[in-house]
Amino acid sequence: MKAREMTQDSITIDAKGKILGRLATEVAELLRGKNHVDFAYNKVDGAKVTIINASQVKVTGNKLDDKMYYTHSGYLGNLKSKTLKVAMKNPDFVIRHAVKGMLPKNKLTQKFLNNLTVVEGEN
């Protein structure tokens, strides 16, 4: 299987050996449709992107131990954190979080993310 297979409205990307941030920027660009000639900021015209082998994505440096993900319930003293190494037990969360950070912060963000499918293994 090639690293990227493209059909008319569906793109499959193999994440095996790719760096997380570079993968996220590529996926965000495809979801927004910036590779199309008729790109517009106010439309959701991007392709449906499927990422396979998500658990084999790489990170550089000491990010596995240093990068933290935080959640807060809103109650006092309820800030929870986990490292990237712990979060990689669920690679869907890690990749979606990275791609969401690369997308514009507006009402279309969730519509873009609905076109993203992350598969842990190979299909």
Image (cartoon, rainbow, N blue to C red):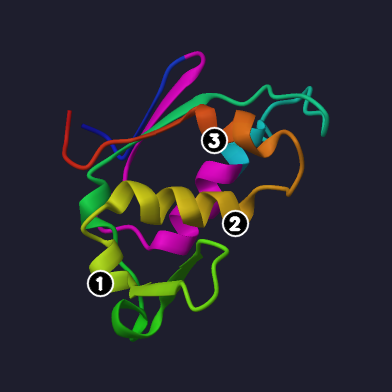
Q: Which residue type does callout 1 highlight?
A: Lys
Instruction: Report which residue position mark 1 lands on.
Output: 85
The image quarter in which residue 80 lies: bottom left
Residue 7 falls inside the magenta stretch: no
Stretch of the chain drawn in magenta: 8-28
Q: Secondary structure at mark 1?
A: helix
Give above or below for 98 relative to 48.
below
Instruction: Report which residue position mark 3 lands on.
Output: 113
* Residue 113 drawn at (x, y percent): 54, 35
Mark drawn on residue 106:
none
Give above or below for 37 relative to 80.
above
Q: How crowded is the residue under tag 2: few (<14 C-alpha within 10 Å), some, or many (20+)? A: some
The earlier-in-sequence mark between 2 and 1 is 1
* Residue 40 drawn at (x, y percent): 82, 29
For the point 31% across and 40% down, which residue is it? Answer: 3
Q: Which residue type does callout 2 highlight?
A: Gly
Task: Depth check: give the residue in front, 110 or 62.
Answer: 110
